[in-house]
Amino acid sequence: MCDSKELLVSFLYDEIDPVAKRNFQQHLATCVECRDELAELGATRAQIATWTPPDADLGFRIIREAESPKRRWFHWSPAWGFAAAAMLVVAASGAIANLHITYGSDGLTVRTGWNHAVDAQAGATNVDWKAKAQELDRRLVDLERAQSQQSVVRTASASDLSEQRVREIVGQSETRQQRMVSARLADMMREYDAQRRLDLVAIGQGMSRLQTSSGADLKQTRDLLQRYLVRTALEEKEEK
Amino acid sequence: MGGDLDSFNQLVLRWERPIYALAYRVIGREEDARDVAQETFLRAFRALKGFKGQAKFSSWLYRITLNLCRDWIRRERRTPLVQAPEGVDVIELAGEEAPSETVEELVSRHELGRAVAKAMSQLPEEQRTAIILKEYHGLTFQEIADLLDCPLSTVKTRLYQGLTVLRKQLREAGVESTFGK
């Protein structure tokens, strides 16, 4: 039974069935070793009960429920804008370039733009195409300009945001540091105050001891003086 | 929803001190213990719909707290720090808590508390947790076994080993076992 520490622990915490408890009690009556160990563990339990956590200002409250983010099947991002713009530019460039490829006796000839010769029949149509191309070109320039302005605005707001965030973080850090410093100062003050009070108590006790002993000394001195005076008076009387 | 919030806050009010005390005793740092306690309630609130009442509410909170403490210890990769309790004024305590207690007795009790805290911080995590749950929160062996996911016999062994080590360390620290007699 001495080897069964589980039984000992069960008995120590009184979480044991009645039969086992009775048996263990009988064992304890004869086993000094188990009795001592039980007593020591019980004393240790009493000691560890003195450890209390420091008082903390808690007061937790759930203020409101967090909103669940709505899932969207499509999310517009700047990447989509750039991709669309790029596709438009490629399509427009292709149209403007008017790619012309011929393969003859002089080999492969690739010509682009509006400088190559056109046949007479197509002349009238050529004017319309040119106007259209110029219109398209102008629209592209407008689009590019609008996009560059938009990106400037976006960059500015992003930098404002990041600056604001940095300020917040710095502010929070400073507040935290101030709080730590004041907590440390408060600790020091508390320790100093506790020490001062203990010193005062000790001084008070010392003073009262001193007063008690001084009173006894004084009484003894007074008695001696009294006796001396009486003796002196008697001697004077005898001399007379 | 507002009703849920109010009801939950009532539970927070009831359990915030035990949960903070558990976290403090496991990790040994006041500020971090507060953070752990706060996070415990936040997680519990978020997971409230999933709580089917299969365990006691307190056991559920204890489990969340212990998991967070374990994460903290793993993250910090260190044993709990023994921090001098803040805001303890032994002279004021003498008047408030035990008027018959002298300053000397109070100081020695305070010192004992610190010695216990130090000895506890040196215990292996599993022994420390078992002792904390048993001694300060009054859980049964079975409840501790459920919380720590270990057999009943393991809980008893951890308690026995932990108490034995504490007894030795307190004796080495010069703490007399006559305290409280």
Image (cartoon, helix red, strand yellow):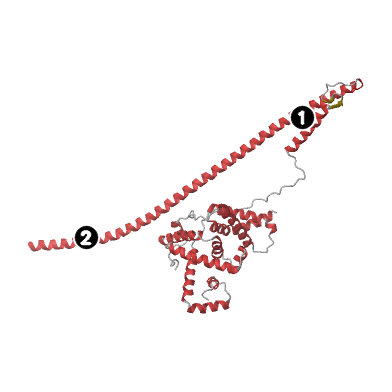
* Disc 1 chain ID: A
**Residue A43 seen:** yes
The numbered mark, 2 or 1, whose residue comes first in the sequence reads: 1
Secondary structure under the numbered disc 2 in the rendered image: helix
Q: Residue at x 21, y 62 (%)?
A: A223
The chain identifier of the residue carrying mark 2 reads A
Judge from the rendering whether residue A157 lies leftward or rightward of residue B17; answer left or right.
right
- Category of crowding for the residue at label 1, using alpha-carbon neighbours closer than 10 angstroms: few (below 14), some (14–19), many (at least 20): some
Q: Are marks 2 and 1 in contact (CB under 8 Å)?
A: no
Please state, as top left, top right, bottom left or bottom right, where the C terminus of chain B lies in the image: bottom left
Write down the residue under mark 1.
A143
Callout in the foreground (2, 1): 1
Q: Can you tell which quarter of the image residue A219 is in?
A: bottom left
Q: Depth check: A177 or B124 in front? A: B124
Residue B180 in the figure: left or right of residue B75:
left
Indicate the position of residue A150 as horizontal and vertical percent values.
72, 32
List the residue tagged with mark 2: A221
Marks 2 and 1, how far apart at CA: 114 Å
